[in-house]
Amino acid sequence: MELVIEKGLPTPNKRLTRYPFAGMEVGDSFFAPLTLAASILTSARRHHPKRFTTRSVVENGVRGVRVWRYE
């Protein structure tokens, strides 16, 4: 089997994220259930140089984390 080199094909888009970090502006925030906390922190680190902070909160009787963009 011979492999063929093809030129000019676009690179596929990056994988989709389930968190809205890319579209957040300074001062924006979102809430997520506590079960997603570790995943959220890992994802936030990938959006450098944007900076995020999290706090444990209870909203509408649900424990979770609120994530804010601050830089």
Image (cartoon, rainbow, N blue to C red):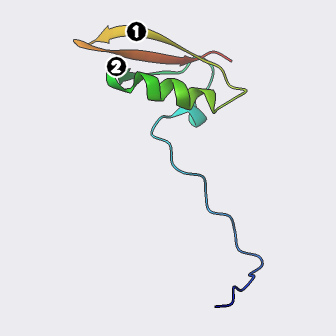
Quarter in which the N terminus is drawn: bottom right
Secondary structure of residue under mark 1: strand
Identify the residue under disc 1. Answer: 56
- Residue at 38% over, 27% down: 36
Q: In the image, what residue type sits under mark 1? A: Ser
Q: Quadrant of residue 13?
A: bottom right
Q: Position of residue 39 (x, y in %)?
A: 46, 29
Q: Quadrant of residue 37?
A: top left
Q: Nearer the viewer, residue 11 or 20?
A: 11
Secondary structure of residue under mark 2: helix
Question: How busy is the neighbourhood of tag 2: few (under 14 within 10 Å), some, or many (20 plus)?
Answer: some
Quarter in which the C terminus is drawn: top right
Residue 64 horizontal side relative to residue 69, left or right: left
- Residue at 50% over, 42% down: 17
- Residue at 76% over, 76% down: 8
Q: Count numbered badges in the picture.
A: 2
Question: How busy is the neighbourhood of tag 1: few (under 14 within 10 Å), some, or many (20 plus)?
Answer: some
Residue 36 horizontal side relative to residue 7, left or right: left
Identify the residue under disc 2. Answer: 34
Cα separation, mark 2 vs mark 1, equals 8 Å
